Structures are given as structure tokens and as C-alpha cells.
Amino acid sequence: MLIDDFKVSTTCNSGTQCDTMYTGESCEFDCDDGYVPAANTSKTSTCIGDDEYSHNALKCQPMPPTIPAIESPFEVEERSKPGTFVGLPIEGITGNAEQTILWYIDPSTNNDGATKDGLGNYLPVFRIGICDGQIKVANALLDFAKKPTYRITVIGKTDGLDVAAS
């Protein structure tokens, strides 16, 4: 039986709902696939009196995505035009097939310190497809004589949880 993002994982003498337990009875709850218990919550609920339970109610949160290690750096030609693909799309794994990973580049790692717009703001060197994880050259001019390598941090988020890889 699913209740939001958690499920009753064992039956009690009072059935599977854990709503009519007697003093001393316990029920076990667990998170649904793709979710993990939040901090300071409990999987066990024990009845200690009339409508009183000895637990911090189980709250589940989505599992953060996993980003497999990138074996080698991506390469791109010097002076590549904006929109040029950089490597293959970043891929990630979630604990639940219904979760989508949204991709971002950490802005603090995404400027070359040289290319500015008309207002004096640094332009991002790369951009990433929020849904497909494809890194592309953005507005900046890649000049390997000035800067031969770039290191960016890519962030994948699901339901507010994130994990970074660079």
C-alpha cells in the first residue's frame, strides 16, 4: 500500500494501516523505491497510549542522482562557434524511473575571466541542456593560448536534491 512516497512494509495485528494500534504494538514503515528516510525520522511506530506514538513520523525524500565518473576530459576545437557540442551528454541515474534529472553548470566555475558583455559581466564559457545534459560552447571565445583548459562543475538535481561532478 503506497501512501505518498512511503509504504507500510510489514503488517501489524491491526492490519496494514497502523491506524488502530493497541498500546505496545509496533508497525514498520519504509520509503517507496527511489526515496530514502529523511534525517530525524523513524521507520518504527509504537503505540504508547491513546493516539500517541513513540516516533518521529517517517518522512521520505528522493534519492539524489548518481553521476558516473567521467573517464577522460571532453575536448572541443579552439574558436568553436557557440552551440558546438562538447563531448557526449552527461548521464545520471535516479532511484526512481519517474524522477527527472535537471542539469546545471555551477556559475562560479563557468567563466574564463576574460570575455565580458557590454555591461562588464563575464559571459559563460559553456552551457548545458537542462533536460538532456549536453554541454555546448556558449558565448565565450575559446582561446587556448590564453587558457588551454577549462574545468566546470555540472550539477544534476532531482526534486531539490543535487549532486555535482566536475
Image (tube, rainbow, N blue to C red):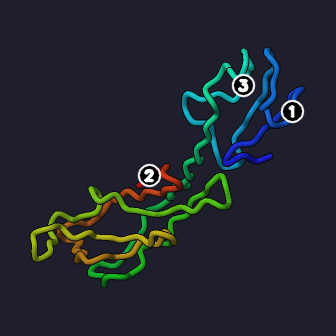
Q: Which mark is residue 65?
A: none
Which residue bears the numbered disc 2?
164
Q: Inspect the image, locate mark 1, and give the three-letter code of the amino acid beneath it.
A: Thr
Which residue bears the numbered disc 1?
11
Nearer to us of marks 1 and 2 is 1
Q: Position of residue 100 (x, y in %)?
A: 57, 62
Q: Position of residue 61 (x, y in %)?
A: 58, 44
Front position in the image: 25 or 30: 25
Front position in the image: 166 or 29: 29
Q: The residue tagged with tag 1: helix, strand or loop?
A: loop
Front position in the image: 128 or 53: 53
- Residue at 61 percent across and 57 percent down: it is 93
Distance from Cα at disc 1 to Cα at disc 3: 12 Å
Q: Inspect the image, locate mark 2, and give the three-letter code of the amino acid beneath it.
A: Ala
The numbered mark, 2 or 3, whose residue comes first in the sequence reads: 3
- Residue at 73 percent across and 19 percent down: it is 50
- Residue at 51 percent across and 58 percent down: it is 71
The numbered mark, 1 or 3, whose residue comes first in the sequence reads: 1
- Residue 131 to residue 54: above or below: below
Q: The residue tagged with tag 3: helix, strand or loop?
A: strand
108 lies left or right of 154: left
Which residue bears the numbered disc 3?
45
